[in-house]
Amino acid sequence: MTAADLLRAGFLLVHALAGAAWFGSIFYGVFVLYPRMNSQFDNFAEHERMALTLSHGARWHMIAAMTLVGLSGLGLLLMPKNAVTYLWLTLAGIKAALMLGSAILFWRVSWHWWPARLFALEAERPTIHRRFRLAAACMLMVVGVNFALGVLAHLI
């Protein structure tokens, strides 16, 4: 095994683990954490305080995972395993577009919707929560599709 093969394997390992952590954290939030929180708190203010406590500082962990996925993906792009084909380049382009789209959505949720959520009036909260659920579902779908395309690209 050459040094290039070891480097490529390292990129692939970091890429897969960071992508799995990113997908897993979204999946856990959507299907475990938030449904349980909704069932545990009758008082909406307590629910929001708990959500704020749990999410405090989490955006930086997500940014770290997204950065690792992006940089390791760039490394894999620059060091392809096999001959570069049109299909492989197409998959890499789609993956890059999905990565950019998920980063933009994450930025919007983190730096625009969270502050709006914190200062929302009681009447605005149901609409805000629907927006957050929709954004989480979109993020889960985009990251999942991106992960699946990565597996497919690796098999080509």
Image (tube, rainbow, N blue to C red):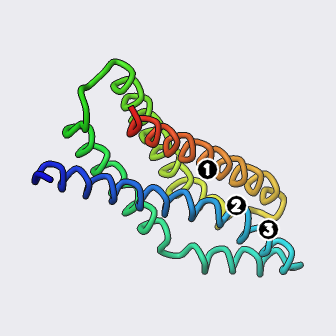
Numbered tag placed on residue 140 in the rendering: 1
Q: Residue furthest top?
A: 86
Relative to 52, is 4 above or below? above
Amino acid carrying label 2: it is Val
Considering depth in this image, is 142 or 118 the residue closer to the camera?
142
List the residue tagged with mark 2.
30
Q: Position of residue 128 (x, y in %)?
A: 73, 54
Categorize mark 1 by other alpha carbons within 10 Å: few (<14), some (14-19), many (20+).
Answer: many
Of pointers 1 and 3, the one earlier in the residue sequence:
3
Q: Secondary structure at mark 2?
A: helix
Amino acid carrying label 3: it is Pro
Considering depth in this image, is 92 or 53 the residue closer to the camera?
92
Q: CA distance from mark 1 to mark 3?
A: 16 Å
Q: Position of residue 39 (x, y in %)?
A: 86, 75
Q: Position of residue 103 (x, y in %)?
A: 45, 47
Q: Secondary structure at mark 1?
A: helix
Considering depth in this image, is 10 or 133 the residue closer to the camera?
10
Relative to 88, is 38 above or below? below
Amino acid carrying label 1: it is Leu
Q: Residue furthest front?
A: 1
Q: Position of residue 130 (x, y in %)?
A: 77, 51
Q: Residue furthest right?
A: 42
Asked if the residue under mark 1 is in contact with the one under mark 2, i.e. CB atoms within 8 Å, the reply is yes
Q: CA distance from mark 3 to mark 2?
A: 7 Å
